[in-house]
Image (cartoon, rainbow, N blue to C red):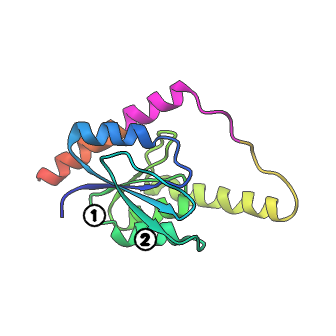
Amino acid sequence: MPLKILVDADACPVKELIVSIAREYGIEVLFFLDTSHILDDGYSRVITVGQDKDAADISLINRTEEGDIVVTQDYGLAAMALSKKAMAIHPGGLVYSGDQMDRLLFERFLFQKIRRSGGRGPHGRRRTREDDERFARAFKELCLKALAMEQE
């Protein structure tokens, strides 16, 4: 199967960058959204799923194959993608690897526990142009790596 980019798109802040870079390299893009979102960019394919908990994640991971690229903020989804020998990247530009997954998943667990007990986890900051540039650089490198692996 040809290389594809699968995007957990409901809260993804880099959809336009993904499409722009994917077009440049001729890579298919699949956006996974629940029914409360609408997207039509003229290039990507949109997979709309129900609003059930994790419906988009399940649909995305079921279509993920070895060598694909998954874009997600969800550490659990990234871990599943890595287990299928796909590559995964965070919209902040972090390329996920197996070496960091245990720590990231443990931190997620701790923050969920803090929130359930009434506390507040770390607050996100506003996205900057530098964040977009960092993502674009890392994403281009990942696309080139995936294309090279596909040629082998």
Please identify the quarter of the rendering in which residue 127 is found.
Answer: top right
Main SS of residues in magenta: helix
Q: Position of residue 138 (x, y in %)?
A: 39, 37
45 on left or right of 105: left
Amino acid at the residue labelled 2: Ser
Residue nearest the observer in this picture, 58 or 45: 45
Furthest toward the left, the residue is: 152
Q: Residues within 10 Å of mark 1 (few under 14, many from 20)?
A: some
* Segment colored magenta: 124-138
Q: Position of residue 98 (x, y in %)?
A: 44, 57
Q: Which mark is residue 66?
A: 1
Q: Position of residue 63 (x, y in %)?
A: 34, 69
Q: Position of residue 37 (x, y in %)?
A: 54, 56
Asked whether residue 134 is drawn in magenta, I would say: yes
Q: Residues within 10 Å of mark 2 (few under 14, many from 20)?
A: some
Asked whether residue 2 is drawn in magenta, I would say: no
- How many angstroms separate mark 2 from mark 1 (CA)? 16 Å
Please identify the quarter of the rendering in which residue 84 is found.
Answer: bottom left
